Amino acid sequence: MAGGYTIKGTGPDAYLAGGRLTIDLDALVANYRDLAARSAPAQAAAVVKADGYGLGLEPVARALAGAGCRRFFVALPHEGVALRRVLPDAEIFVLNGLFGQEAAAAYREHRLMPVVNSQSDLSVWEAYGWDGENPRPCAVHVDTGMNRLGLTFERARALASENALTRALTPILVMSHLACADEPGHPMNRRQLESFQAVKTLFPETESSLCNSAGIFLGGDFLCDVTRPGIALYGGGAVGGIANPMRPVVLAEARIAQVRRARAGESVSYAATPLARDTIIAVASTGYADGYHRAASGAAVPLRATRAGASGFIHGQEAPVLGRVTMDLTLFDVTALGEDAVAVGDHVELFGPNMPIDRVAEAAGTIAYELLTTLGRRYHREYVGDGA
């Protein structure tokens, strides 16, 4: 059970799938509660964009709502529409703003609050947003240094002055986004905080939000009124250089399709990576079509010529990737486990409790966000825990 409904396995049947994902909703809830405690006295919202960071919007959102989360952030309006069907009473903010007047009707119908990022967003929402007790509710995003989305400080000041007279909008939240919070000592963090403190004075009656997952660990004045954890909810490390305190949420495994033996001097996979010794090879049914990135091959890929590749975990031991990861198959060196230790039908852990996702991401030259959000549709998925 999770949030009052039963979750069954999703995706292809377990006996037909090349891999399986086990998603621990209890761990997700424990992470939310941990981050909420770190955020206090601010309120912790939850970022559930990209299909709940690849883990399934509905089970993720229900589990978080069951843990007391009432505010949610998505990136796109269609994500907000999907989330509204799951959580009829939640506050839902759409980070990427308005997509023009055609989209405004969907925001009204599904009670989605745009994050106003530009003059275009302002114009559309003033013209096509809803009227009522709280006319045209929204969040106001002010850029403090990322140069990605957000109003300039000057435009925000003009908006605050104009809106004090017209009350055309009802800003629920004023927000910005940290660029370097994963590096606690980076001077950009302090510069952005100081800029945002000036922004907050423009909207003295409006709640404020600056922190993503990493920002929560900065604490103090960074916390403001609302925090917006994302990757840390799902078990990823938010801050570099420290032990990750979050519980792993996802166990990704691939089925072994074949075990074979090759002699020293023979080669493996595309581009014929040579073997330095006699090797026992476990051929796993996963590849870049499943989100196990080709770059995890390490030195077998020219762009990663100086990087060690990823490893899997099977029967209590690590097993390095051999040669190039391909679309549907990845080879693992299981020689150290000995003869007949690995059999067809066994599963190798790609990432999870024994093989941290951040370590695998680093081996692939990427980040945990990308591994999660590119998980393919060919896994059998099981949700465990009740999210309580």
Image (cartoon, helix red, strand yellow):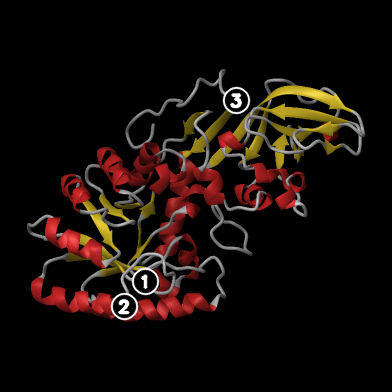
Mark 1 or mark 3, which is nearer to you? 1
* Residue corresponding to mark 1: 143
Residue 267 point in image, percent of width and height = 84, 33
Q: Nearer the viewer, residue 270 or 29?
A: 270
**Foreground: 288 or 50?**
288
Identify the residue at image location x=67%, y=21%. Answer: 345
Helix, strand, or loop for circle 3? loop
Q: Estimate how packed mark 1 is, as few (under 14), some (14 to 19) or many (20 or more) residues with alpha carbons within 10 Å.
A: many
- Please give the name of the residue rendered at 38% of the width and 65% of the height, measured from the top-left corner: 40
Q: What residue type is disc 2 on?
A: Phe
Direction from residue 270 to residue 60 in the image, left or right:
left
Image position of 296 with respect to 124: above or below? above
In this view of the protein, which residue sits in the foreground, 253 or 263?
263
Query: Quadrant of the rendered structure where residue 281 is?
Result: top right
Kindly identify the amino acid type of the residue bearing the numbered disc 3. Gly
Instruction: Give the residue pinned by disc 3.
Output: 18
Dot 3 alpha-carbon crowd within 10 angstroms: few under 14, some 14 to 19, many 20 or more: many
Distance of label 2 from label 3 (alpha carbons) = 51 Å
Between the C-alphas of marks 1 and 3, the distance is 44 Å
Earlier sequence position, callout 2 versus callout 3: 3
Mark 2 lies on residue: 153
